[in-house]
Amino acid sequence: MARSVYSKHFGDVPGISAPGQHTVFTVPPGFVAVVRDVAGLQTSPTGDAFLREATSTTSWVHWESTRALQSFQWQGDQVFEEGSQIGLYVGSGSWSVRFCGFLLAA
């Protein structure tokens, strides 16, 4: 049986500086999300952020910046089941981050 594949812009976290977890996208029922590309820009003098499933403390990437306007890129495959929340955890600094990938019909 064929499955539908949708290229998806999961969302942006524009200029967020509040420490803590920020949910970008919640995987809807009947779908699986695959994050393929994440781009980030750290705009304060220093900062750190984690890419992770919002209800978990397990991160798949940690970015640490030592200067303003430092950019970051991540490419790969991170799979999220329905109901999962794709997110960014800000430890410090100010971040703008964009998440893209595929939304697969289950």
Image (tube, helix red, strand yellow):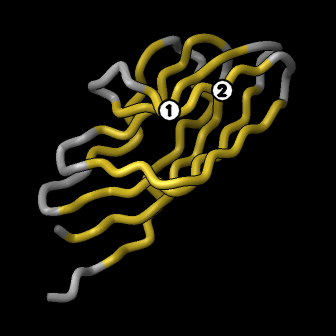
Mark 1 sits on what residue?
Answer: 51
- SS at mark 1 in the image: strand
Instruction: Examine the image and state in which quarter residue 33 appears.
Output: bottom left
Q: Position of residue 90 (x, y in %)?
A: 54, 19
- What amino acid is found at the position of numbered circle 2 in the picture? Trp
Q: Position of residue 38 (x, y in %)?
A: 58, 47
Q: Which residue is located at x 76 percent, y 21 percent?
A: 65
Instruction: Examine the image and state in which quarter residue 1 appears.
Output: bottom left
- SS at mark 2 in the image: strand
Q: Crowding near pointer 2: few (<14 within 10 Å), some, many (20+)?
A: some
Left or right of residue 66, residue 50 in this image: left
The answer to whether mark 2 and mark 1 are in CB contact below 8 A is yes
Q: Position of residue 83 (x, y in %)?
A: 18, 44
Q: Which residue is located at x 73 percent, y 39 percent?
A: 72
Q: Position of residue 98 (x, y in %)?
A: 57, 47
Mark 2 sits on what residue?
Answer: 63
What is the total number of numbered labels drawn onto the structure image? 2
